[in-house]
Amino acid sequence: MMLDARQTPPALPNTPGVGFKPAHFQGLTSDPGPVGWIEVHAENYMADGGRQIAQLRALSEQFAVSVHGVGLSIGGAQALDTDHLARLKHLCDWVKPASFSEHLAWSTHGAEFMNDLLPLPYTGATLTHVAAHINQVQDTLGRRMLLENPSSYLAFDDSTLSETDFLAELVSRTGCGLLLDVNNVFISATNLGSGARDYIDAYPLSAVGEVHVGGHAEDADEHGAPLLIDSHGAPVADAVWTLLGDVLARTGPLPTLVEWDNDVPDWPTLRAEAARAADALALV
Amino acid sequence: MKAFHEALLDPALQAPEGLHDGRGGAAGKRFDVYRNNVMQSLTDVMRAGFPVVRKLIGAANFDIVAGAFIRAHPPTQPIMQRYGGGFDGFLAEVPQLASLGYLGDVARLEQALRLSYHAADTEPLGASALASMSPEQVARTRLIFAPTVHLIASVWPLYDIWRYNSEDGAPKPQPVAQHVLITRAGFDPAPHPLSPAQSAWIAALMAGTTLDGAQDAASAVEPDCDIAAPMALLFAQNALTALKGTA
């Protein structure tokens, strides 16, 4: 069933946000710079108590919050883990986030959770079960969710739909919104020898509720073709800032998140990345 | 996805069929990006959870043992704070580590510290709670512990081993059995050394025995066991949440 209009909390502001790291709690709360909202990985805040829960409670009083799931396995063929869905609902019920998002990816097969965002073929069959999973999430949480495009290192012979058509069809079938990860677009286009701007041209930009930028690492495959790794462990590449500017020129200002999850820098360094996002937003 | 999943944790398997590089070629080693991501992310979880085990056996050995654990016992749920349970028993079965008999106890201690860190917040019981009771009432009272509290029994100098490998300048471990009580007065769990008799006293209380019965349990281990010190510790460390009297 298509999600109908429900009571929606205030949206994320069209300002820079940062992926929250506990090491930045003091810096972020005392000197946020241009940061108007934060994003947290849902699975890190499912404990019963302790410092991290207390930090999120405090942060949610100062900033708009985006809850970003990394473990629901929406792209998998098997049924969603209803225990995990219940934990997500509990988290969203008390945080009352401005946004909930997850990934077009799978991570659980059978009973095993692989702790990575794994790819799926884009076919009529996968479209059907991903749409059913999104409907289940939206019905359980009582809100519209955003779905993020993956970073790809390979593609499936079985795919019959482009990723952009697949996402557009999910939006049409479920009423979900999209989280456009510009770094992922750049990574996938580079890795698969396609065009990042062609992807943006074909992408349903009107459904975007949030954009991501983050750092990647450069490698090559065994044939010498470029292979970018979605490391979230470096500054955002200049080419990704440029692509973000192209996107924002078409969409207008959007909530723009800087992700830096590995080799986490000090707060002033991340704040400076957020300031670059503010510069990009100021141009549109 | 079955073939994809199986090949992730088994480097001996070929990458699955039906994958390409977007340029007209087979995906080849590109599949290894996913293999690396899975092993790297889970190894990072293990490194963060067991820093003292890692220090005791060395970073390179730790990665090998953690990798074997991950392949044998991959996560079965998506909350990585909870992953790593059973690593103590796994370590005990590794023949090359047999000479480090205390390693499993150290892993249990580190796992308990993580569980305590993320456990529910509770209102502590004040030290005055027992003050107004008659000795007979106190004897029949049971103590309710906070969910942050853990007790680790060991025949090794477990507290000293943990501390020596966690704090600069900590004293060298002495050859004495130390049990460890973990409490969390605020947000940071703290381990405390206990004698076997003190540990027997707390273990009995945690199992729901009355203070009278717990005294008997402690005396059975050490006739003149001092329980005033561990009692003060429980109150000072916010380890208790309530009392339960008996009729």
Image: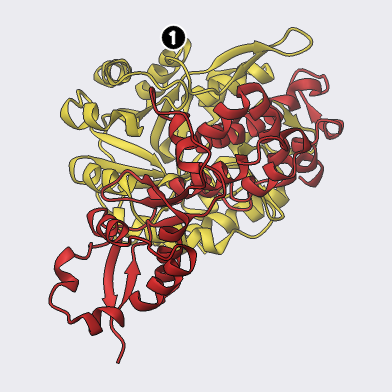
Chain colours: A yellow, B red
Give the answer, above or below, for where A136 lies relative to B134: above
Give the answer, above or below, for where B146 lies relative to A181: below
* Relative to B24, A142 lies left or right: left
* Relative to A15, B89 lies left or right: right
Q: Position of residue A48 (x, y in %)?
A: 38, 57
| Residue B74 vs residue B8, the one in the foreground | B74
**Helix, strand, or loop for circle 1?**
helix
Query: Could you tell me if residue A20 is visible in this image?
Result: no
Residue count near mark 1 (Cα–Cα under 10 Å), binned few <14, some 14–19, many ≥20: few
Q: Residue furthest front?
A: B224
| Residue B22 vs residue A37, the one in the foreground | A37
**In the rendered structure, which amino acid carries the disc numbered 1?**
Asp
Residue at the spot 24% in from the left edge and 84% down from the top edge: B136
| Residue B192 vs residue B115, the one in the foreground | B192
Q: Position of residue A110 (x, y in %)?
A: 72, 55
Residue at the spot 24% in from the left edge and 59% down from the top edge: B235
Q: Position of residue B86 (x, y in %)?
A: 63, 50
Q: Where is residue B222 in the image (x, y as percent from the top left)?
A: 45, 62
- Residue marked by disc 1: A238
| Residue A252 vs residue B245, the one in the foreground | B245
Give the answer, above or below, for where A11 lies relative to B11: below
Query: Could you tell me if residue B174 is visible in this image?
Result: yes
Count of numbered tags: 1
